[in-house]
Image: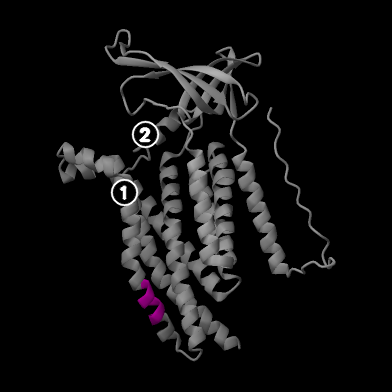
Amino acid sequence: MQAENVIIIVVGSVGTKPKGGVVLTIRQKIILIIVMISVLFLHTAALGEEYEYEGEDLGYDEVMAKGKVLKIEESTAPNSLEGTGIPLTVQEIEVKVTSGVYKGQALHVENHLMDNPAYDIIVEEGDRVELLLEVKDGNIEAAYITSYDRSVYVYYLAAAFIILLLVVGKMKGLKATVSLAVMIFLILKILIPYMLKGYSPIMLSVVVTVISTVITFLLVGGVTIKSLSAIIGTAGGVLIAAGIAVIVGKLARLTGLGVEEARMLMYIPQGIEFDFQGLLFAGIIIGSLGAVMDVSMSIASSMDEVKHANPDIATNDLIKSGMNVGRDIMGTMSNTLILAYTGASIPLLLLLSAYENTLSSVLNFDFITTEIVRSLAGSIGLIVTIPLTAFITGFLEKLQSGNQ
């Protein structure tokens, strides 16, 4: 197997001041440790470039690896795929394996094209691709191109995103990057694995939501009334969205099987009996979290600024200022949720329009109703977050003023 890279982190003893070094506060040490943990997680996730699956019934192992097209030796004239009449072109390709234990080996690959853009992988010299290797007794028996290697562009885009966060946000951007890494960790290492073990998707999504919300707001805002108000407001808004989704989903008899990916889960090799309605509701909880967090923190932060600018402001006036900010946010953020779901469904909307389905019939499709419930439940949760966060912030600010 490929040797894994090792990261060694050395932490000095508490209270020791190194010569010529910098003494960090406890808060800075905590942030530094969180950053290092996040980097370690992202580094570990990036190592997974080779995956091996044992083909017990096939007599060989299937290994996924990355490769680079060295040259296309020839492209045969189109022939008919036997018995189907479908035109067939075969590309004879030389590929170099660029990852895993077979790195550096040159392979001959036949790339079959059927004049169907949905399935054809048309490659050119220099292209980076994903390979499926059939391995027996340590030798590669056959190789196939399964897709383009798009990961490098995703890494570039992610790097640009993080750099912009750090340049524009400085320390706040660093904290936002750490909170994002923590959220990715929670999703990839807790939410998904434990769902595959059969745990309740709703319970898991609530746990992930609570943990990510608390960590994000404490990192960004510190241990303050602003952060506490935003945490409570976010929790309330997400729970309202989830509650509405569950109630309407049960009444409308939504199955959670409206999309192809959900139906494919019925046939995975692990044989897990998923709660598909639960998966649907869990998706709504996770999907609404970002917008609700944005609204609650915006309101709590604006009210905190008003309180600092005018310490003697009445509680009612402070709440009104928070509500005014919330009303300004409400329209755009509700549109954000609905447009996000609409944008992902444009091909579906075109298909329904092309077949001239009536509104009544469209609303009775399981997958259409699911998307409507998803977007409206999230938007309602977002709207409820506004007064909830405003009143909680006003109440906590009043308590703090009374204790001073």
Picture coordinates of residue 16, whole percent (x, y): 85, 66
Hey, what amino acid is under mark 1? Gly
| Image side of residue 238 versus residue 22, left or right | left
For residue 371, above or below residue 320 = above
Q: Residue at x 33, y 61 (%)?
A: 334
The answer to whether residue 325 is magenta is yes
Q: Is residue 399 visible?
A: yes
Q: Nearer the viewer, residue 85 or 196?
A: 85
For residue 178, above or below residue 253 = below
Instruction: Quickly name the residue at label 2.
Output: 260
Q: Residue at x 54, y 63 (%)?
A: 167
Picture coordinates of residue 111, whole percent (x, y): 43, 19
- Secondary element under disc 2, as helix, strand or loop, is helix
Q: Residue at x 27, y 44 (%)?
A: 346
For residue 363, above or below residue 307 = above
Residue at the farthest top position? 83
Q: Quadrant of the N terminus?
A: top right
Which stretch is magenta? 320-326
Instruction: Quickly name the residue at label 1.
Output: 343
